[in-house]
Amino acid sequence: MAGLREKQKAARETRILRAASSQFRREGYRKVRIEDLAEAAEVSVGTVYNYYRTKGDILIATVAMEVEEVLAAGEGIVAEPPDGAEAALLALIFQYYDHSLEYLSKEMWRMAMALSIEAPGTPNGVRYSALDSKLAAQVTDLIAALQERGEVRGDVDAGPLGRVVFNTLNQIFIDFVRDEAMPLHALRETLAEQIRPLSRLMSPGKT
Amino acid sequence: MAGLREKQKAARETRILRAASSQFRREGYRKVRIEDLAEAAEVSVGTVYNYYRTKGDILIATVAMEVEEVLAAGEGIVAEPPDGAEAALLALIFQYYDHSLEYLSKEMWRMAMALSIEAPGTPNGVRYSALDSKLAAQVTDLIAALQERGEVRGDVDAGPLGRVVFNTLNQIFIDFVRDEAMPLHALRETLAEQIRPLSRLMSPGKT
DNA sequence: GAAAAAAGTTGAACAGGTTCATTTTTATAG
DNA sequence: CTATAAAAATGAACCTGTTCAACTTTTTTC
C-alpha cells in the first residue's frame, strides 16, 4: 500500500507539468513539441499522452493553477470591498489582471482561451469554462455584497449584471493578450474606462 | 489585357471557397481535409495554399462574407431604431443572431473565433478582428442615435457603453456556439436578460 | 518467492496541415 | 510563330500531434 507505482506516477506527472510550464513560457507553446516535454520529463512521448489527453490539456492544467490562485485572492476583496462600486470592482479586477502574467505568457492565455472555445465538449474546454464561471460568480458576489451595503442600486438583479461586468473584463483581457505590445497599464485604463459608466449607472441616488 | 490567367485565377478561388463553404458546413470543419477541398475544386493541394495561407484562412473568408451581410442589414436598424433603448438594442442584436446560422455552423463560428484569438497577428486574426470592431462600432452608433433622440442618458459616453453592450452580445454568442444543444430562442432570452438591466440603467429620468 | 494478472511505458506508425523544388501554363519579346 | 521570361500548379516530402500493439514493471495470488 506504500504505492511505489503511485509515487512514480505522481512524480512523472509533476515532471511533465513542470517541463511544460517552463518551456511553454520560455519557448512558446507552439514551438514546444511533445517530444521536447517528454525528453525534459525523462519519459517517452507515449507516456505524456498517458497523463494528458492532448497538448492542449497540458496547457489548460498550467492555466488552471494560475486561475485557482487568483480566485482565492479575490475572496479577500469580496469579503471586504473598498468603498464605492467603481473602486470595489476595479480592485477585484485589477487583482485578476495584475497576476495574469506572473506564470503565464500572453500566448498561453490566447491558446487556452482558443481551446476552450474550439473544443467546448472536451475535458479541456469544460475545465476552462468552469474556471470562467467561477470568476463570473465571484464578480456577481461582489456586486451582491455592494447591494447589501447600499452602494449599488437594489432594483437590478446582481446575476445578469455580474455577467455583464465579467463579460466586459473578459473581453478586454482577450484584447490585451491578443496584442503582444499592449502593456498592463493600458489594460487597466481600458477597463476603468468601461467600468466607469457601468458603475455610475449602478450607483443609487443618481438622477 | 483580357486576362485569361486572371479569369482562371478568379474561377479557381471561387471554386475553392465554394467547396469550403459547403463542405465545412456539411461535413464539419475539422473533418474536411485540404485534399478534399482540392479535389472538389479540381486543383491540387499546393494550389489551395496558393490562394489561402492556411486552412483557417479559408474559414475566415467564409465567415467574413456572412458578417459583412449582417453589418449591412444592421445599418437599416441604426438609421431607424424602434422606440426605447431596450427594444432598439434587442432589434439590432437579434438581427445579428437570427442570421448567424444561415450559412455557418456553430463549429465554424467556434473555429473562427478561436483562430482570431489564437493567431492575432496573422491575416486571419486581423481580418476577423476588423469585423468585430465594425460590429462594435455599429452598436455604438445605435446608442449614439438613441442619445440624440433622448432615449438614452446623455451623460455617459456612447463609446465605452457601446463596447460594453458589444462585449455582452459577443460573449453570449460565444456561449451559444459553444453549446451545440442551445437553441436560438435561448440565446435571445439570455441576451434579453442581460440587456434589460443595462438599458434600464441607460434610460433617462429613472430615479 | 514464483507465476499470473494488472498497470504502465514505449516508440514506431499514422494522419493531416504545410512547404518547396520541379513542371506546366500563360504572357511577352523579337 | 518561336524563344524567353514570368506566373502558377503540382504532389511528394516534411513536421508534429496522436494512436496503439508489443514490451516492462509493479502488484497480487498462492
Image: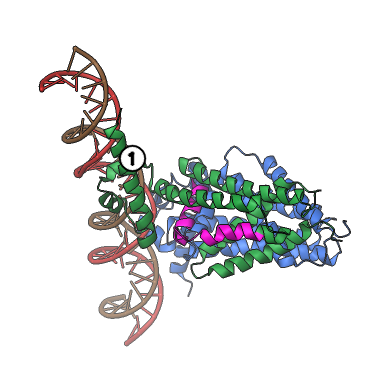
Chain colours: A blue, B green, C brown, D red
Task: Tell me where the magenta segment starts and ends, as one range.
Answer: B90-119
Looking at the image, can residue A18 be seen?
no
Q: Position of residue B1 (x, y in %)?
A: 30, 27
Horizontal arrangement in the rendering, residue C10 relative to residue A8 (left or right): left
Q: Position of residue A179 (x, y in %)?
A: 58, 41
Main SS class of the magenta portion in the image: helix
Amino acid at dot 1: Ala
Looking at the image, can residue B80 be seen?
yes
Q: Is residue B98 magenta?
A: yes
Residue at screen point 72% across, 43% down = A189
Q: Residue lying farthest front? A: B80
Q: Is residue A109 magenta?
A: no
Identify the residue under disc 1: B10
Q: Quadrant of residue B88?
A: bottom right
Seen in the picture, residue C25 relative to A6 is either above or below; the reply is above
Comparing A169 with B90, the one in front is B90
